[in-house]
Amino acid sequence: MSKNEISKGILHSLLVITGVLLTLYLLFEIKVLVGYLIIAGIISLIGRPIVIFLNNRLKLKNTTASIFTMFFFLAVIIGIISLFIPLVIEQGKNLSLLDIDSFQGNIKFLYAETSTYLNRFNIDLNNTIFNMDWLSNMDFGFVPEILNSLGKTLGNLTIGILSIMFISFFLLKDAMILERTLYVMIPKKSSKKFGKSFESIKLLLSRYFGGLILQIFILFIIYTIILLIIGTPNAFVIAFLCSLLNLIPFVGPVVGGILMILLTMSSHIGADFSSVILPKAIYVSIGFIFGQLIDNFFSQPYIFSNSVKSHPLEIFLIIITGGLLFGPLGMIAAIPTYTALKVIGKEFFSENRIVKELTKNL
């Protein structure tokens, strides 16, 4: 190999590396827009069956069907926001005038009651990591500050929602717009395989996200019924938050369960611990475990077996890998990303033995 060829090879490699780095830098700078596009893509996948239904059954044009679908999503968003706004306003008024000393006293009271009850069973909280020192040194002044910054967050959230809805509408209206954009970057000889892969990915992910909505809805109903029976204030809001946290595999359900129990206990501060607070916390725990059993043995197997066509152990390993590499967001994105890679692998590397084994059910 001549010096000229070596120089050209080095120069080409440097240009490729520079191009990749510039692309990554650009994506980092516009990460908010990239996030909007990803969320809009997910919404378009969820809304795709609705558009198809309106096209085929009601004979609506694609534009009209897309408008109806977006109005449906908008109504859902408004419904969710209307559920939270009264609670946020009420808590905002309370916390803006909050007596921090009184609030801290209530927390300490709840701790003392729990400690006294556990002492009957020779369990001393002061000898564990949950001792009184960290609670005494905690500065609760951050609570009103969080509420004061909520206005800015809501403003940014409104802009984000409008942007996502705008992008989602055009992705629903013209389902081929994203495909045509990607076709430009694909070699012509691979365009046919890419087209088949893209359609399969859209179908599988559309089913998957639809299944996730069903999963959240089932948990929401179970949690709401439990909290209403027990008499927990703001049962709908708490149930929605805890069911939504279930989207984060493994970690989310644990956080949701702890949140549900703590909110139930804190809403009855001042009542007798042994006869009121503790029994309600136990009932909530039992209800939460029941909901998780339904989710783990019915909802999730149904979603995974009928949408992404993957074995539960396979899914478990992929989610753990996503979490180790990218944290909670990696755990959420692991299954959709893995499904897309499996479909692409089946089309482009169908002769590979490993790919054959992994994609035999697709």
Image (tube, rainbow, N blue to C red):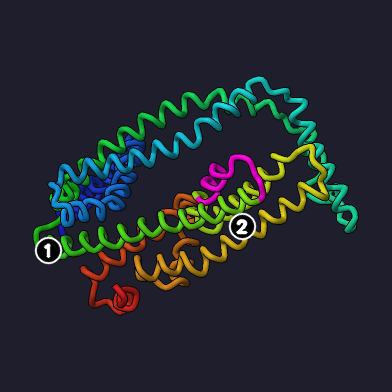
User: Residue placed at 31% from the left, 47% from the top?
Assistant: 43
Q: SS at mark 1? A: helix
Residue 120 found in image quarter: bottom right
Tell me where residue 276 appears, x and y as whole percent: 78, 47
Q: Quadrant of the C terminus?
A: bottom left
Q: Nearer the viewer, residue 140 or 230?
A: 230
Mark 1 sits on what residue?
192
How many residues crowd around disc 1 within 10 Å: few (fewer than 14), some, or many (20 or more)?
Answer: few
Question: Where 4 falls versus 309 (above or below)?
Answer: above
How many residues crowd around disc 2 within 10 Å: few (fewer than 14), some, or many (20 or more)?
Answer: many
Question: Where 88 falls versus 110 (above or below)?
Answer: above
| Residue 273 lies in the magenta stretch | no
Q: Quadrant of the N terminus?
A: bottom left
Tell me where residue 260 appears, x and y as whole percent: 63, 48
Q: Is residue 22 visible?
A: no
Q: Nearer the viewer, residue 294 or 56?
A: 56
Q: Is residue 296 visible?
A: yes
Task: Give the residue type that dot 1 points to.
Answer: Lys
Specify whether 93 is left or right of 345.
Answer: right
Q: SS at mark 2? A: helix
Q: Nearer the viewer, residue 297 or 4?
A: 297
User: Residue placed at 75% from the left, 53% from the top?
Assistant: 279
Dominant SS of magenta comes to helix
Seen as rendered, the residue at the extreme top is 97
Specify whether 25 is left or right of 226.
Answer: left
Start and end of the magenta stretch?
A: 230-243
| Residue 241 lies in the magenta stretch | yes
Mark 2 sits on what residue?
288
User: Residue placed at 55% from the left, 26% from the top?
Assistant: 89
Task: Give the residue type that dot 2 points to.
Answer: Phe
